């Protein structure tokens, strides 16, 4: 379960942000791979296996998937799986294929999410449905989903009891991700903007945080860790996963397209209920609240109107509020890691958590 902390827009919360400003300045210049260069060969192997598995399939059906995955991405989930395994006494080799499966699922969700959100760009290039049409994009996502389940049932992990736990974790978490997306889509379908923070965190805990939590727990499971350690790593992952999403939403309003690789202000066009939007709606004047909701409902692409919405959000201190919440989640996550023995990979987990709230891409 994610630790949820209510943060007030007060001088104390401003002090928290100032306290971490130096950290942000350090990490914004850092590429994620700089945090764990020793994993380069193992992450390359994950990449090679994904491409090899896809290349063996019928190109008429799977032909777009390989290039889509090759567009890049941070490979955060495989990296966290590798780090969590080693930090709890395991070896990297034991999680290569299990971590690859998580990354395949993540890419499946990206393809379908882009359709559902009508996103125009993914990793700096037009989304699949924009280039090839919705039917082809849907089927490409479906094909990837069937492929990763073939990989799950074919896993050879001993003892069998551990394999069954792993397969159950995949199934439970994949359902959480889909449920989280479904909650968000239900708000869109009903036109709801009176979303509470607790509802927001329920949604994001499924849609984003659950898969990062799974990555960490799978690593701990395959190192032979007990349930307590597995739960610790999962909570760490869920906390930084929520922080990751909050930072992503902040970047969508104020990031640099050349770094972020997605359209700036796209969340306003989409009408997305981010933590900043939820907070701003709750704390705006009636005039500003009604105007913000009107803009979000209009799905406008007009840059001036998008800037107006961003201005309302900033007026209520909602960007700093969200950033402060992300910082606190990361601090809670790092405290959990004090229960692990010191190691290079424990330090990499700490650094990754910090990077999640300072990244610019």
Image (spheres, rainbow, N blue to C red):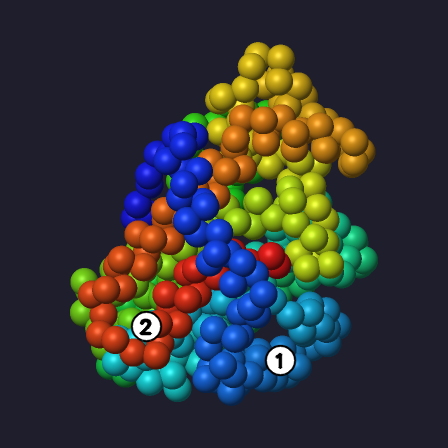
Q: Residues within 10 Å of mark 2 (few under 14, many from 20)?
A: many
Query: Residue tagged by mark 1?
Result: 51
In this rendering, the answer to whether 317 lies above or below 120 is: above
Which residue occupies 57% across, 12% down? Answer: 286
Could one spot residue 324 in this view of the protein?
yes
**Nearer to us: label 2 or label 1:** 2
The foreground one among 321 and 271 is 321
In this rendering, the answer to whether 336 lies above or below 187 is: below
Q: Position of residue 225 (x, y in %)?
A: 22, 73
The foreground one among 70 and 361 is 361
Q: Which mark is residue 346?
A: 2
Q: Position of residue 303 (x, y in %)?
A: 79, 36
Task: Give the alpha-carbon distance from disc 2 to disc 1, as whole Å.
Answer: 29 Å
Q: Quadrant of the C terminus?
A: bottom right
Which residue occupies 57% across, 80% down? Answer: 47
In this rendering, the answer to whether 271 lies above or below 164 is: above
Q: Position of residue 52 (x, y in %)?
A: 61, 84
Could one spot residue 198 in this view of the protein?
no
């Amino acid at each position: 379960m994610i630790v949820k902390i209510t943060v007030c827009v007060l001088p104390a919360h401003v002090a928290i942000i100032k306290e971490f400003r130096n950290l942000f300045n350090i990490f914004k210049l850092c590429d994620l791979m700089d945090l764990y260069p020793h994993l380069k060969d193992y992450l390359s192997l994950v990449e090679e296996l994904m491409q090899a598995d896809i290349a063996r399939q019928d190109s008429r059906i799977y032909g777009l998937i390989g290039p889509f995955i090759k567009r890049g991405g941070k490979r955060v989930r495989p990296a966290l799986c590798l780090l969590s395994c080693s930090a709890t006494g395991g070896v990297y080799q034991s999680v290569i294929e299990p971590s690859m499966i998580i990354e395949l699922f993540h890419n499946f969700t990206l393809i379908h999410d882009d359709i559902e959100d009508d996103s125009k760009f993914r990793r700096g290039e037009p989304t699949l449905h924009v280039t090839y049409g919705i039917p082809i994009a849907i089927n490409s996502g479906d094909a990837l989903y069937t492929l990763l389940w073939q990989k799950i049932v074919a896993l050879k992990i001993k003892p069998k009891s551990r394999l069954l736990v792993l397969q159950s974790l995949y199934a439970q978490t994949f359902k959480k991700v889909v449920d989280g997306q479904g909650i968000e889509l239900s708000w869109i379908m009903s036109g709801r903007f009176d979303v509470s923070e607790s509802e927001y965190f329920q949604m994001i805990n499924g849609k984003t945080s659950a898969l990062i939590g799974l990555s960490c727990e799978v690593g701990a499971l395959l190192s032979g860790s007990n349930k307590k350690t597995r739960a610790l790593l999962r909570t760490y992952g869920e906390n930084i996963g929520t922080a990751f999403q909050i930072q992503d939403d902040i970047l969508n309003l104020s990031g640099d397209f050349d770094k972020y690789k997605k359209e700036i202000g796209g969340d306003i066009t989409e009408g997305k209920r981010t933590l900043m939007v939820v907070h701003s709606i709750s704390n705006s004047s009636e005039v500003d609240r009604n105007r913000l909701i009107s803009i979000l409902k209009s799905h406008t692409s007009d840059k001036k109107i998008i800037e107006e919405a961003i201005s309302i959000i900033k007026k209520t201190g909602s960007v700093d509020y969200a950033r402060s919440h992300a910082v606190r989640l990361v601090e809670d996550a790092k405290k959990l890691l004090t229960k692990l023995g010191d190691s290079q990979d424990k330090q990499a987990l700490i650094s990754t958590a910090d990077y999640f709230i300072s990244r610019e891409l």
